[in-house]
Image (cartoon, coloured by chain):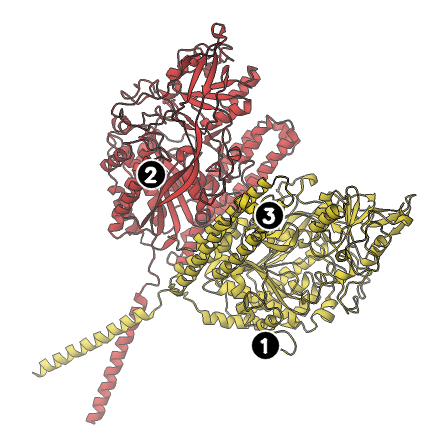
Chain colours: A red, B yellow
Amino acid sequence: MREESRLMRWIWWTVVITAFFLVGFIIGWFAKPTHSNSSDDSASSRYLREFLDEMRPEKIREHLRKFTRLPHLAGTQQNLVYAEQIKEEWLKFGLDSVEMVPYDVLLSYPNKSQPNYISIVDQLGNEVFNTSLAEPVPEGYEDVTDIVPPYSAFSAKGQPEGDLVYVNYGRTEDFFQLQRQMGINVTGKIVIVRYGKIFRGNKVKNAMLAGAKGIIMFSDPEDYCAAGVQPYPDGWNLPGGGAQRGNVLNLNGAGDPLTPGYPAKEYAYRHSLEDGVGLPKIPVHPIGYHDAIHLLKNMGGQIPPNNWKGALNVSYRIGPGFTDDFKTHKVRMNIQTNNQVTRIYNVIGRIRGAQEPDRYVILGGHRDAWVFGGIDPISGAAVVHETVRSAGRLLSRGWRPRRTIVFASWDAEEFGLLGSTEWAEDNAKLLQERAVAYINADSAIEGMYTLRVDCTPSLHTLVYDITKQIASPEEREEGLSLYESWHKRDNWTNDRDAPRISKLGSGSDFEAYFIRLGIAAGRARYTKNKKTERYSSYPVYHSVYETFEIVENFYDPSFRKLQAVARVRGGLIFQLADSQLLPLDANQYAVSLSKYAQSIAQLAQMHPEEMKMYEVTFDSLFSAVENFTVAARDFHDRLETLDRTDPLQVRIVNDQLMYLERAFIDPLGLPGRPFYRHVIFAPSSHNKYAGESFPGIYDSLFDIENSANPEKAWEEVKRQISIAAFTVHAAAMTLTPPA
Amino acid sequence: MREESRLMRWIWWTVVITAFFLVGFIIGWFAKPTHSNSSDDSASSRYLREFLDEMRPEKIREHLRKFTRLPHLAGTQQNLVYAEQIKEEWLKFGLDSVEMVPYDVLLSYPNKSQPNYISIVDQLGNEVFNTSLAEPVPEGYEDVTDIVPPYSAFSAKGQPEGDLVYVNYGRTEDFFQLQRQMGINVTGKIVIVRYGKIFRGNKVKNAMLAGAKGIIMFSDPEDYCAAGVQPYPDGWNLPGGGAQRGNVLNLNGAGDPLTPGYPAKEYAYRHSLEDGVGLPKIPVHPIGYHDAIHLLKNMGGQIPPNNWKGALNVSYRIGPGFTDDFKTHKVRMNIQTNNQVTRIYNVIGRIRGAQEPDRYVILGGHRDAWVFGGIDPISGAAVVHETVRSAGRLLSRGWRPRRTIVFASWDAEEFGLLGSTEWAEDNAKLLQERAVAYINADSAIEGMYTLRVDCTPSLHTLVYDITKQIASPEEREEGLSLYESWHKRDNWTNDRDAPRISKLGSGSDFEAYFIRLGIAAGRARYTKNKKTERYSSYPVYHSVYETFEIVENFYDPSFRKLQAVARVRGGLIFQLADSQLLPLDANQYAVSLSKYAQSIAQLAQMHPEEMKMYEVTFDSLFSAVENFTVAARDFHDRLETLDRTDPLQVRIVNDQLMYLERAFIDPLGLPGRPFYRHVIFAPSSHNKYAGESFPGIYDSLFDIENSANPEKAWEEVKRQISIAAFTVHAAAMTLTPPA
């Protein structure tokens, strides 16, 4: 009996213990989350706040000061020194890895022993006037050596001599007007054009096509001086002795002219100079307005239309050549600039992504400058530096982004976006398969008015979202967000109630990433008031007067504008790298496509007769856009019910979002421009700086006017509409459920 | 005391129970797998066994019988009927979805009221001999209408008349020999060549380049009759009245000639016929050997070298023209074939992937046939049909593959791979981003000897693995695997101890997937003994004698060979779709690259002087291959320690494996062949059927011989070596850790 009861008790306790064990097991089993990396969006947004708060004006000032002390032209020793310094500091800030990535690309420098200049020569060949050999050096920099004088990089060498013809801005329409309305042929002449409105390389191309044997570009005060502002150093206007450097290539996205399509590594095959891409065949030279007066003041020929007149006290006569009094005087260009294969260095830093190391979010901007680079590019590079510092601080507090972040300090941007393009070529496969977005970081400020953003439509929503989380940098706007500040200054009147965002053109390092590879891209900077400030770019652009002091004294004394830009660029990077679902908006792409389709169809409707005759219709494009709109809406609707705890389901929709931009790439490229492959966006064929939508259709319509065979020209329009419609349809397919 | 002891006991038991609960909880916590879709490889391999076992010879026979009753040329009603039937049956078998996908492509048909033929005409223009208008119809098919007579699809129309010149197989080397050694110019002549050795389109291109105004192709018994075999229906040899149909395009991967690069949809822009891709400009016609005798027997001119002589009882004199007795006789071609934009239909079926619906494994083969298609393609289509049936059975038992499987019944393969290429163009973005592999399913049998596999190097290991799991179909080989059976018949002598696997060339529907898009691809079929059977292809190829009966009576009476091929193709698809880790082997790619690099460098070493003079070196390529080899080895080493329970980590390495083949694609394409973009593999420029490794280098070396400017030609060799080295380096990068 006692034995039995003891046995019973043991059985009892065994059962109880087992039951508790089992209950424990079951609770343990179910208590454990199925997957550990479920979204922790609240932690991420706390880190975002810390990330933005960490960026400090005084730090940005410090970075700007440090990297603008000496000239650091691409290919020079000083630019390598800065590269090494950046590498070291990025490592110190806490990046996981930083590497120097060299390429050997074609650069172009003036010949130090035979300076470039332009002369007026008399009948005996005496140089009766010579343009200046350098800009007056700003105070405090008198002892600096290695300031490269103003020149047009990649100019052909030569001493062409002849009569001048003035062609306004040297735009396509200016040359058309010259030839068709004024009846002037520039074959064998030297053209002189004012800087502004379009990329200088397009001016050079137009001059070559028109048959000119040389081209001079000058900065007119109308285009490079703001009203009521003193020339530097008393204000931020361009002094008369200042001139705009710059390359005059027509690369169309090729990168290094000698290695188009492939990275310029040691073993790379290099074309001969004659076969190089985009190199001008005529001499080119830039001058300031003091020198320009001497060339222009005695010009003869027709009186120009009013919109060809600048702000100099000269008559802006067209030529050819000088007035009767100076009939025997000619202009001679003396250009000794050399092309030279030179080593350049990108600095590439990385933060390894925690969950998706194979997804890349890139923040890239260039480091090389024509001289000091106070604005271009170091105002931007200082912002990148501060972003890296802030990210490093977060890393030290335990944060690690979901995806990999890549920081790039590009070299040789000023010589044709070479560093960024070579790296894109070198890493094309990885980028195509893995890059989520590219945020560009060139000059962070070009005016004092408000924010300016150019980006792909799928980033619009994120840009608005981020700017709402950033404080306005303007005085007397405490409590206002950057979004509100921006909105009240630059709101869209007839479209939507939001601040303006523009299309990306080119002229900076995002080009290869966006237009060639189809990676969602954007850029942000502080800008001028477009409505009231009519000058081009900013007055001292690419001159020796782009110093640290011009930023500190005029553009952003508090450095709060640069801080705001840092927060925009950094905020975009952060959200793209850390959000569980990619913050890309296909619906916004649909809205933009619809707008662009309307607009290109309207342009074609300027030829209603031919449209009928050649049976040209945009129906297929409209239908494709409609199709895309529905696919985008359905896609975002499905996201609402996505199981966010399933990492594969999340990855699959993120891949769809990432590859959306890629869907607009046509591997065959645009006609004659194999490295411009984006069917929706390309730099204008007439101005690299401007972004054109449906560029294939646009260019074919443009050619209608000038075609000897209109039927063939309209056939090309039809072909381009068909390609656009197909591409938009294909993009819609990428948004549908994958099986 | 008693109270205390009871209390103690309670405390004691509470502690014990709590401890057990905790132990239970902890065990429960850790016992639970972190993620539910961890590899269940044993379940998968059980299903593989069931999948292979389910495929039955009698079912394959049934499918073959069903789809070979009537002629079903692309673009005809009957081929649409078969398409609809396939769609219905695939749905019945259990696929998740099946759709018909139409395109409107350029096809080519004889003019029914003006048949094509070739005449010998006398001096008065009388036709003293005409070739036959059709093949004698095989027994049992006498009442069948709509048998298209032998013709060369896409031939130009015309009635050229002139002297014949015999040019052997019409290969590049044959024309070189004719022109350089024999001193014969074919300008304005009609050339006659025998079929075989190379793709007929290359013969036509060579004839055009040489200046011929027409080309006749005949089947010589030496090339289309096996020794000791009777002509059909008593055996499987080509009867004298049989002739080989086929297209004579030089598309180089363009697909529909009027819509190169884009799918031939309703809104697609179509080029004019003059601008169409690859259309021959001269008349072309095929004849059998009975007719050929009449054209050849009285030919005059030089006696040919022995290797130009076929097996007919004629002298194979070169010409031009006939012997003195028939000097006044000329040959006239009468070709009235029409090009015509015609609707074609692909059938696309899908099994949605359970975990990764956005990863596609494709099994595709064509349905259209020149006549009945007993071998080409229905022996292959029947195998696909059986694969679908077997997969459907598995689905009904609860299986669902990890990835999506796509089954395709292509149309208009015979007209230039049109159905498959248009679909690839239509879905290029999805395929580029999501396709894991493409397995081709053209004719499953072309001989009775053993297995033949052509595939990308990364599939070698899987092919060996799968064939080891399949039984030999040979009689008296019970217990032997297909691998063993294959190995003893076709082993590699000087390379490795394994059965031979060859490079992919072209000539079937994998082309756009592999060579244009860079998707890992392979094909498998039963073949002849290459060492002893010297005829081209198989004797009745593209004739009316390709019937159900030729398979049933001669090629595979038991249908076990077709079953074995079904299991190979199906097994590949299964493993690619269902393995947790993709069964792709980068190490094998490294081995192949190394072999190809050696071999192309050896070819160049045939010009040691010039190699020195022009400083041509393969060092960069060897170094890239070495780099790739290390990257591949390290990649597979890392796989050993992969945490397979982490779905993102698994996805990341699978993406690297999937994109490996893509890494060899150069978006700029091969010189002059924009749709051949694979840097490692392309169809030979001299024979579309053959695969060339490092085709860019190969072609540039070939051009050395014929270049007027050797320096420039060697520059191109150097450029191509540099592109190859870059591409291999870039591919290696895709295998390194992603961040």
Residue B515: % across, % down: 57, 52
Q: Are marks 2 and 1 in contact (CB under 8 Å)?
A: no
Q: Nearer the viewer, residue B681 or B17?
A: B681
Residue sitting at x 65%, y 41%:
B270
For label 1, the residue is B480
Of tags 2 and 1, the one toward the viewer is: 2
The disc numbered 3 marks a residue on which chain?
A: B
Labels 2, 1: one chain? no
Q: Quadrant of residue A712?
A: top right
Q: Secondary structure at mark 2?
A: helix
Q: CA distance from mark 3 to mark 1?
A: 45 Å
The local crowd at label 3, few if under 14, some if 14 to 19, many if 20 or more residues have their Cα within 10 Å, is many
Dot label at residue A80: 2
For label 3, the residue is B701
Residue B201 appears anywhere in the view: no
Q: Secondary structure at mark 3?
A: helix
Residue B653: % across, % down: 43, 58
The local crowd at label 1, few if under 14, some if 14 to 19, many if 20 or more residues have their Cα within 10 Å, is some
Q: In the rendered view, does B152 fall on the left or right side of A699?
A: right
Q: CA distance from mark 3 to mark 2?
A: 41 Å
Position above or below: B552 against B418? below
